[in-house]
Amino acid sequence: MIGKDKNQNLIYLSIDTIEDIIKAKNKAVKVIESCKNDKHLNSAKNYIKLYMNATDDLVGASQLELQLLEKRKELC
C-alpha cells in the first residue's frame, strides 16, 4: 500500500508502476527544460496535466508546475 485515493480506498502500486511514474516525471522535467517559447511552455503545461491525470501524483505535479513557472520567468 502506498496511500489512499479521494474515496479513502487503499492504493496499491507495484515497483514497476512506481518506475513508470518516475520515468514520466523525468520526461516532464526534460520537456520543461527544453522549452524555448510560449508554445513550448503551453505544451509542457498540457503534459503536466496528463501526468497528473495518469499518476494522481499531486506532489510531483506541483513540483513540475513550479519548475514550469521558473522556466516561464526565465524566458520572459
Image: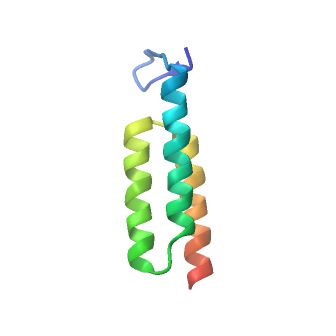
Name which residue lies at 44% across and 53% down: 48
Image quadrant assignment for residue 29: bottom right
Image quadrant assignment for residue 7: top left
Number of numbered discs visible in the structure rendering: 0
Q: Quadrant of the C terminus?
A: bottom right
User: x, y percentage for residue 34?
Assistant: 53, 70
Is 7 displayed left or right of 20 in the figure? left
Q: Residue furthest bottom?
A: 76
User: x, y percentage for residue 68?
Assistant: 55, 65
Say above or below: 60 vs 17. Answer: below
Is 54 displayed left or right of 35 in the figure? left
Q: How is the image coloured?
A: rainbow
User: x, y percentage for residue 25?
Assistant: 53, 47
Name which residue lies at 60% across and 60% down: 66
Name which residue lies at 50% across and 73% down: 35
Say above or below: 33 vs 26. Answer: below
Is 49 displayed left or right of 71 in the figure? left
Say above or below: 33 vs 27. Answer: below
Name which residue lies at 39% across and 52% down: 49
Q: Quadrant of the N terminus?
A: top right
User: x, y percentage for residue 10?
Assistant: 47, 14
Is 6 displayed left or right of 73 in the figure? left
